Image (spheres, rainbow, N blue to C red):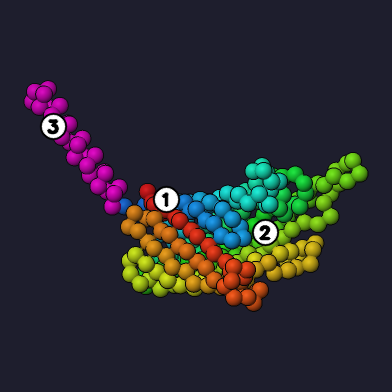
């Protein structure tokens, strides 16, 4: 066999191998899933989030997430010392894949929990759980996170820095569920509660209790848009601009 024929056969064989490998990869189960979301609501303001999950086996993922809190009052103002949250954990799937449960631990950085005049790294932790249901017709989500101070901030007093007298803790949770009208639109109901200082150094209080409907548009590209609005049922006022709330999330999800 001539050198040219051997080269030609080797080239054809390599092309067949690469084509087969690419085909196998395109039909295999994705190893990682990512979600980028732009969020804004009437209390927390603008807070983009990033979530990632790496598939370990058919029922378990390793997860990581980050929240970029941008509300100036959560930091030191002027765009510096902004509250920053990062964490990770695992994601557990049922056998049919329609229900997931994700316990995670987040690290808080800033001054909202430590309650001092200066931002601090590792000022607090937030053990949290997220659970999702997703079927051909139904969808739902439950979230709960306990924001707990682990460091004490510093405040100026009589020309020197002393420990802040109080720290802040928060319990934040929501639950929602909806019905898929079709492949592109779903509607549902959302309830959310934020409480301050559960078992903290200050008296506990309820910040808000939100209740209202949502509508979500889903696009084949992996992009979704959800708008939620309703009343702060804690304030017992109508939707008059005083006791109302709103949430908007634009998200993009993809796998590889």
Q: Please identify the dominant SS of the magenta region.
A: helix
Circle 3: element type: helix
The residue where tag 2 is placed is 147
Instruction: From the viewer's perspective, tell me whether residue 21 is left or right of residue 125.
Output: left
Circle 1: element type: strand
- 3 or 2: mark nearer the eye: 2
- Foreground pick, 218 / 122: 218
Residue drawn at 60 percent across, 51 percent down: 69
Residue drawn at 54 percent across, 57 percent down: 40
* Rendering coords of residue 21 (x, y %): 26, 43
Q: Does residue 38 belong to the magenta stretch?
A: no
**Span colored in magenta:** 1-27
Q: Earlier in the sequence, mark 1 or mark 3?
A: 3
* Rendering coords of residue 72 (x, y %): 66, 49
For residue 165, say whether it is visible: yes
Distance of label 1 from label 3 (alpha carbons) = 36 Å
Q: Does residue 4 belong to the magenta stretch?
A: yes
- Foreground pick, 223 / 140: 223
Find the residue positioned furthest to the left. 1
Q: Earlier in the sequence, mark 1 or mark 2?
A: 1
Q: Earlier in the sequence, mark 3 or mark 2?
A: 3
The residue where tag 3 is placed is 9
Mark 1, Cα crowd under 10 Å, few <14 / some 14-19 / many 20+, is some
- Foreground pick, 133 / 162: 162
């Amino acid at each position: 066999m001539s050198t040219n024929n051997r080269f030609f056969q080797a080239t054809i064989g390599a092309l067949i191998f690469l084509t087969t490998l690419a085909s196998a990869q395109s039909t295999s189960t994705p190893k990682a899933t990512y979600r980028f979301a732009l969020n804004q609501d009437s209390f927390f303001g603008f807070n983009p989030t990033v979530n990632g999950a790496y598939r370990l086996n058919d029922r378990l993922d390793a997860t990581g997430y980050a929240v970029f809190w941008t509300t100036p009052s959560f930091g030191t103002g002027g765009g510096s010392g902004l509250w920053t949250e990062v964490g990770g954990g695992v994601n557990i799937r049922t056998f049919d894949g329609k229900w997931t449960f994700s316990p995670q631990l987040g690290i808080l950085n800033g001054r909202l929990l430590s309650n001092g005049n200066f931002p601090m790294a590792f000022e607090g932790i937030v053990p949290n759980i997220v659970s999702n249901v997703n079927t051909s017709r139904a969808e739902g989500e439950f979230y709960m996170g306990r924001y707990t101070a682990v460091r004490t901030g510093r405040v100026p007093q009589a020309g020197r820095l002393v420990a802040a007298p109080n720290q802040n803790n928060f319990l934040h949770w929501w639950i929602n569920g909806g019905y898929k009208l079709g492949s592109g639109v779903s509607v549902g109901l959302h309830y959310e509660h934020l409480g301050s200082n559960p078992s903290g150094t200050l008296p506990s209080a309820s910040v808000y209790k939100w209740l209202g409907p949502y509508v979500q548009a889903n696009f084949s590209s992996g992009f979704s848009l959800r708008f939620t609005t309703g009343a702060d049922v804690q304030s017992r006022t109508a939707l008059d601009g005083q006791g109302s709330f709103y949430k908007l999330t634009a998200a993009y999800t993809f796998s590889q």
